[in-house]
Image (spheres, helix red, strand yellow):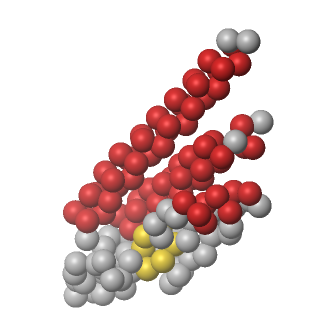
Amino acid sequence: MLDGIDVFRITGARMRQLSERQNVLAQNIANADTPHYRARDVKPFQFDSALLRTQGGVAPLRLAGAQSGHITGSRGGADVTTDRANSYSEDPTGNTVDLEEQMVKQSDVAKNYDLAALVYKRSAALMRSAVSSR
Protein backbone atom coordinates (compact mmCIF):
# COMPACT_ATOMS: atom_id res chain seq x y z
CA MET A 1 0.00 0.00 0.00
CA LEU A 2 2.68 2.53 0.97
CA ASP A 3 5.09 1.30 -1.72
CA GLY A 4 3.41 3.56 -4.26
CA ILE A 5 4.49 6.67 -2.37
CA ASP A 6 8.02 7.84 -3.16
CA VAL A 7 9.02 8.87 0.36
CA PHE A 8 8.23 5.37 1.66
CA ARG A 9 9.97 3.64 -1.25
CA ILE A 10 13.10 5.74 -0.93
CA THR A 11 13.37 5.55 2.85
CA GLY A 12 12.64 1.82 2.69
CA ALA A 13 15.40 1.37 0.09
CA ARG A 14 17.77 3.44 2.25
CA MET A 15 16.98 1.33 5.31
CA ARG A 16 17.56 -1.90 3.33
CA GLN A 17 20.89 -0.54 2.05
CA LEU A 18 21.97 0.43 5.57
CA SER A 19 20.92 -2.97 6.88
CA GLU A 20 23.05 -4.66 4.21
CA ARG A 21 25.97 -2.37 5.03
CA GLN A 22 25.67 -3.26 8.71
CA ASN A 23 25.74 -6.94 7.73
CA VAL A 24 28.87 -6.46 5.58
CA LEU A 25 30.65 -4.52 8.33
CA ALA A 26 29.80 -7.27 10.82
CA GLN A 27 31.29 -9.79 8.38
CA ASN A 28 34.46 -7.69 8.22
CA ILE A 29 34.73 -7.73 12.00
CA ALA A 30 34.05 -11.47 12.12
CA ASN A 31 36.85 -12.02 9.62
CA ALA A 32 39.36 -9.67 11.30
CA ASP A 33 41.75 -12.59 11.89
CA THR A 34 41.19 -14.42 8.58
CA PRO A 35 44.40 -14.38 6.49
CA HIS A 36 44.13 -12.52 3.16
CA TYR A 37 40.58 -11.32 3.90
CA ARG A 38 39.83 -7.99 2.24
CA ALA A 39 37.56 -5.58 4.08
CA ARG A 40 34.39 -4.92 2.10
CA ASP A 41 31.86 -2.14 2.13
CA VAL A 42 28.59 -1.25 0.44
CA LYS A 43 28.60 1.40 -2.24
CA PRO A 44 27.11 4.71 -1.09
CA PHE A 45 23.36 5.23 -1.43
CA GLN A 46 22.39 7.13 -4.58
CA PHE A 47 19.01 8.84 -4.57
CA ASP A 48 18.39 8.43 -8.33
CA SER A 49 19.43 4.78 -8.49
CA ALA A 50 17.40 3.95 -5.37
CA LEU A 51 14.30 5.46 -6.89
CA LEU A 52 14.78 3.58 -10.17
CA ARG A 53 15.62 0.30 -8.44
CA THR A 54 12.61 0.39 -6.15
CA GLN A 55 10.27 0.96 -9.07
CA GLY A 56 11.20 -2.37 -10.62
CA GLY A 57 12.27 -4.32 -7.55
CA VAL A 58 15.61 -4.65 -5.82
CA ALA A 59 18.74 -5.45 -7.82
CA PRO A 60 20.63 -8.63 -6.87
CA LEU A 61 23.64 -8.50 -4.57
CA ARG A 62 26.98 -8.49 -6.36
CA LEU A 63 29.87 -9.65 -4.21
CA ALA A 64 33.43 -8.84 -5.15
CA GLY A 65 36.14 -11.16 -3.93
CA ALA A 66 34.11 -13.59 -1.80
CA GLN A 67 36.21 -16.61 -0.96
CA SER A 68 35.43 -19.93 0.66
CA GLY A 69 36.05 -19.99 4.40
CA HIS A 70 34.89 -16.44 4.93
CA ILE A 71 31.77 -15.68 6.90
CA THR A 72 29.13 -14.35 4.51
CA GLY A 73 25.62 -13.10 4.99
CA SER A 74 22.30 -12.97 3.20
CA ARG A 75 21.53 -11.62 -0.24
CA GLY A 76 20.42 -8.02 -0.33
CA GLY A 77 19.94 -5.18 -2.74
CA ALA A 78 23.21 -3.33 -2.23
CA ASP A 79 26.43 -3.40 -4.26
CA VAL A 80 29.21 -4.82 -2.10
CA THR A 81 32.80 -4.11 -3.09
CA THR A 82 36.23 -4.68 -1.66
CA ASP A 83 37.05 -1.66 0.49
CA ARG A 84 40.66 -1.59 -0.63
CA ALA A 85 41.01 2.13 -1.37
CA ASN A 86 39.76 3.22 2.05
CA SER A 87 41.74 0.70 4.05
CA TYR A 88 44.32 2.22 6.37
CA SER A 89 46.58 -0.77 6.75
CA GLU A 90 47.26 -4.37 5.89
CA ASP A 91 48.58 -6.77 8.49
CA PRO A 92 51.37 -9.29 7.75
CA THR A 93 48.79 -12.00 6.86
CA GLY A 94 47.27 -9.79 4.15
CA ASN A 95 44.12 -8.92 6.12
CA THR A 96 42.88 -5.35 5.55
CA VAL A 97 40.25 -5.17 8.31
CA ASP A 98 40.89 -2.26 10.68
CA LEU A 99 38.59 -2.75 13.67
CA GLU A 100 38.55 0.94 14.62
CA GLU A 101 37.55 1.90 11.08
CA GLN A 102 34.78 -0.72 11.08
CA MET A 103 33.42 0.54 14.41
CA VAL A 104 33.31 4.13 13.11
CA LYS A 105 31.45 2.93 10.01
CA GLN A 106 28.98 0.96 12.15
CA SER A 107 28.31 4.08 14.21
CA ASP A 108 27.64 6.01 11.00
CA VAL A 109 25.25 3.28 9.82
CA ALA A 110 23.33 3.40 13.12
CA LYS A 111 22.99 7.20 12.92
CA ASN A 112 21.79 7.10 9.30
CA TYR A 113 19.38 4.23 9.98
CA ASP A 114 17.83 6.16 12.88
CA LEU A 115 17.40 9.18 10.60
CA ALA A 116 15.75 7.10 7.84
CA ALA A 117 13.47 5.43 10.39
CA LEU A 118 12.48 8.85 11.74
CA VAL A 119 11.62 10.10 8.23
CA TYR A 120 9.56 6.96 7.62
CA LYS A 121 7.75 7.25 10.94
CA ARG A 122 7.01 10.97 10.53
CA SER A 123 5.73 10.41 6.99
CA ALA A 124 3.44 7.65 8.24
CA ALA A 125 2.16 9.96 10.99
CA LEU A 126 1.50 12.66 8.42
CA MET A 127 -0.46 10.18 6.30
CA ARG A 128 -2.50 9.04 9.32
CA SER A 129 -3.22 12.65 10.19
CA ALA A 130 -4.37 13.41 6.65
CA VAL A 131 -6.62 10.34 6.50
CA SER A 132 -8.14 10.81 9.95
CA SER A 133 -9.02 14.48 9.37
CA ARG A 134 -11.59 13.61 6.69
Residue at horizontal 35 percent and vertical 83 percent from the top? 84
Quadrant where the C terminus sits is top right
When the figure is inspected, residue 7 is found, relative to residue 14, above or below; the finding is above
Give the quarter of the image for residue 93: bottom left
Residue 29 rendering spot, x and y as whole percentages:
35, 64
Q: Is residue 33 above or below residue 134?
A: below
From the top left corner, tell me how far across and down residue 25 is, in percent.
40, 62
In the visual, does 63 lie left or right of 54?
Answer: left
Front one among 83 and 4: 4
Q: Position of residue 120 (x, y in %)?
A: 55, 36
- Image check: 67 left or right of 4? left
Residue displayed at 60% across by 75% down: 62
Q: Is residue 103 visible?
A: yes
Which of 48/93 is in front? 48
Extreme-top residue of the structure = 133
Where is residue 51, by image quadrant? bottom right
